[in-house]
Image (tube, rainbow, N blue to C red):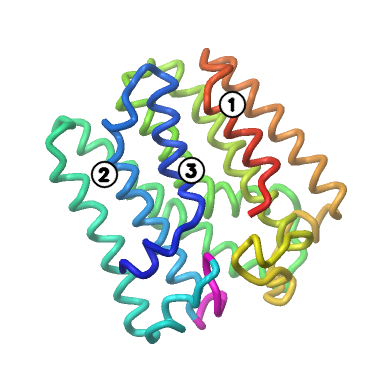
Amino acid sequence: MLYSIEAGGKRLRPILMMASAESFGGNYQSVLPIAIALEMVHTYSLIHDDLPAMDDDNYRRGKPTNHRKFDEATAILAGDGLLTYSFELIMRQPNITDEQKVYIVKQLANASGPKGMVAGQILDMQAEKKNIELQALEKIHTLKTGQLIKFAIVSGAYIANASKEQMEALDTFSYYIGLIFQVQDDILDVTGDPTILGKPVGSDEENFKSTYPKLLGLEGAIEIKDYYVKKAKEALQTAGVTQTILEQLTDYLSDRKY
């Protein structure tokens, strides 16, 4: 469990959660335990994604994947351990109320389970070796990647006591942030530097994955990413939190190199 947690990575989801809390006047420390739990769920998903039965990857975050470092059984159990321990971590935190704990656990379970990330993973596998339309591709990534990102942003604002109207605007913002992240991921799998990415490029094509560049071409993928950025920033305006770190993170996600 520690091997994969300590391997590094962008820590994007925890950062988004803390940035969201601060954007609405909260303290990032108030959501830090929840952010750690979220990173544990994300890391569990990566361990299982890398398994031979899924993507069969040899490297993650510049290091051998968990099943290559140890073995498949250990990797499966490490992922299971991270997933279940994340909920325990949330429930034992003394600095949030019982009502907040119930809300957070329910939202995290929904985001990571069969109506969220797991559903997206199934759809992603079913789309392999097929030609799908843009709407279907967006649905895959809204579930597989976007739901945990949405949880990060909305939960951070919730703990900071954002209004109902602001939370609704953040739903829209989160939707586009998830798509921005994924389309840039797809672009980097074509154009990225493996020494910076910490993993080989071209794996999507090798695994017959449905991607934005495959569907729209590289230039088309860049164009739709710019559209997503525009819509995300419009949602931030509606929420009343422009010129915050959330806006800076939107630009970072669009331009990132790893």
Location of mark 1 (residue): 247
Q: Is residue 55 left or right of residue 162?
A: right
Using the numbered discs, state the Cα–Cα distance from disc 2 to disc 1 in whole angstroms.
27 Å
Q: Amino acid at mark 2?
A: Val
Image location (x, y in percent) of residue 137: 68, 53
Q: Is residue 55 magenta?
A: yes
Compared to residue 197, the image places residue 240 above or below, namely: above
Q: Are marks 3 and 1 in contact (CB under 8 Å)?
A: no
| Residue appearing at x 42%, y 76% in the figure | 66
Compared to residue 23, the image places residue 18 above or below, namely: below
| SS of the residue under disc 2 | helix
Q: Earlier in the sequence, mark 3 or mark 2?
A: 2
Image location (x, y in percent) of residue 251: 66, 34
Location of mark 3 (residue): 149
Q: Earlier in the sequence, mark 3 or mark 1?
A: 3
Q: Is residue 110 magenta?
A: no
Q: Amino acid at mark 1?
A: Glu
